Image (cartoon, rainbow, N blue to C red):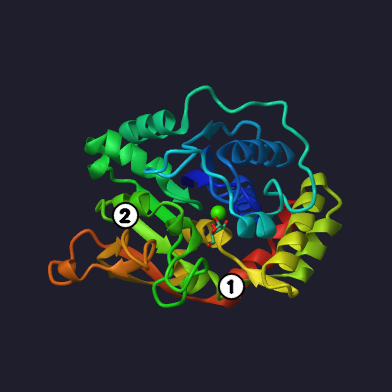
């Protein structure tokens, strides 16, 4: 069994990642912490609660996290590009039925930090800016020796960014936070654009999901249709966040290389994940970076996902 906490900026690909984690029999989903990014943190909470209810997983607690980047002085307002890709509220062109449940009264930082202090037999997967995790590491330095695993979807090491030439969206939205996490020396795996842009979900997947005739099948299928139309505009699209969850189940689908990574916070390449040449020799605080993937195996895995819907 894999114990997971997801940290999501719940837009469309986050929703698919959440659904895989909520339904896979090898995953024990302990909780979901929410962050801003594709949507505001409050929209991320609402979407997560609504989806968990459709997934029949109202047992999974949801926690509200930070509403802005570490050095920002105002609540994050999603960019036009994010609104276009994920829809006005992060669920494409359909409205999710509001859940009767509310987020827990404990916030994401308190919840996750106290869980980390109690146990290390779980993995944290982040699919948005890493502000929540960085806030925890800043507030509780003793957690720098935490023995659990972290997988983050973000960064672009060998390919161009998707915000600009250098930077990927999740890192770009809070480079200071990403730097703190990536340089922490914890057990960290990067699932970046290097691999996620090679893996595809197809129109035939959305058709299959909708054909399940369940509310969650129809909802996720329509969300994927919207995402297909607004990313590449083709009958296939990238698989960013779901790949991070799949990597926890099937690390053997990926090839990793360990590198001493850092994040640029100054100049034109602010938000760029790069190798820290100062640590090339000692090679300390390494991050496992996925640089290749067996796309056939992942796409086969995804093609069977409809059975859970
Ligand atoms: O760059 C892709 C990432 O940015 C994904 O996590 C997507 O959901 C957005 O957050
Ligand atoms: Ca995301």
In the image: residue 8, left or right of residue 51: left
Residue 3 on image: x %, y %:
46, 44
Residue at image x 51%, y 66%?
Answer: 163
Q: Earlier in the sequence, mark 2 or mark 1?
A: 2
Assign ligand 1 to one image quadrant. Answer: bottom right
Residue at numbered disc 2: 179
The reply to whether residue 156 is in sight is yes
On screen, 147 above or below 223? above
| Mark 1 burial class by Cα count in 10 Å: few <14, some 14-19, many 20+ | many
For this rendering, which residue is in front, 296 or 98? Answer: 98
The residue closer to the viewer here, 235 or 278, is 278
Q: Percent x, y for residue 29?
A: 54, 41
Percent x, y for residue 49? Answer: 65, 35
* Residue 262 in the image, given as x and y percentages of width and height: 28, 62
**Number of on-image labels:** 2
Which residue does the numbered mark 1 point to in the structure image? 199
> Does residue 121 appear in the picture of this structure?
no
Considering every residue shown, the one lying at the far left of the view is 282
């Amino acid at each position: 069994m894999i114990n997971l906490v997801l940290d999501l900026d719940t837009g469309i690909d986050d929703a698919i990642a959440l659904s895989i984690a909520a339904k896979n029999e090898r995953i024990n989903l302990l909780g979901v912490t929410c962050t801003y990014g594709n949507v505001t943190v409050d929209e991320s909470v609402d979407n997560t609660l609504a989806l968990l209810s459709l997934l029949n997983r109202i047992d999974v607690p949801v926690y509200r996290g930070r509403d802005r980047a570490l050095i920002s002085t105002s609540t994050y307002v999603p960019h036009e590009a994010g609104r276009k890709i994920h829809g006005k509220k992060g669920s494409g062109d359909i409205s999710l039925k509001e859940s009767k449940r509310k987020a827990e009264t404990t916030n994401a930082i308190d919840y996750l930090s106290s869980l980390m202090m109690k146990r290390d037999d779980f993995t944290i997967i982040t699919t948005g800016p890493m502000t929540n995790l960085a806030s925890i590491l800043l507030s509780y330095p003793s957690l720098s020796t935490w023995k659990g695993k972290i997988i983050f979807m973000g960064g672009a090491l060998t390919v161009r960014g998707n915000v600009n030439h250098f930077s990927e969206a999740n890192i770009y939205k809070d480079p200071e936070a990403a730097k703190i996490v990536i340089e922490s020396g914890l057990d960290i795996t990067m699932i970046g654009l290097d691999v996620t842009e090679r893996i595809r979900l197809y129109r035939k997947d959305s058709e299959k999901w909708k054909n399940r005739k369940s509310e969650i099948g129809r909802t996720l299928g329509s969300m994927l249709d919207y995402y297909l139309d607004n990313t590449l505009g083709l009958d296939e699209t990238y698989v960013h966040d779901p790949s991070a969850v799949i990597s926890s189940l099937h690390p053997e689908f990926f090839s990793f290389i360990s590198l001493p990574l850092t994040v640029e916070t100054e100049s034109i390449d602010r938000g760029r994940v790069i190798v820290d040449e100062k640590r090339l020799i000692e090679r300390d605080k390494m991050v496992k970076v996925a640089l290749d993937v067996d796309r056939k195996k992942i796409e086969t895995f995804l093609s069977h996902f409809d059975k859970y819907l």
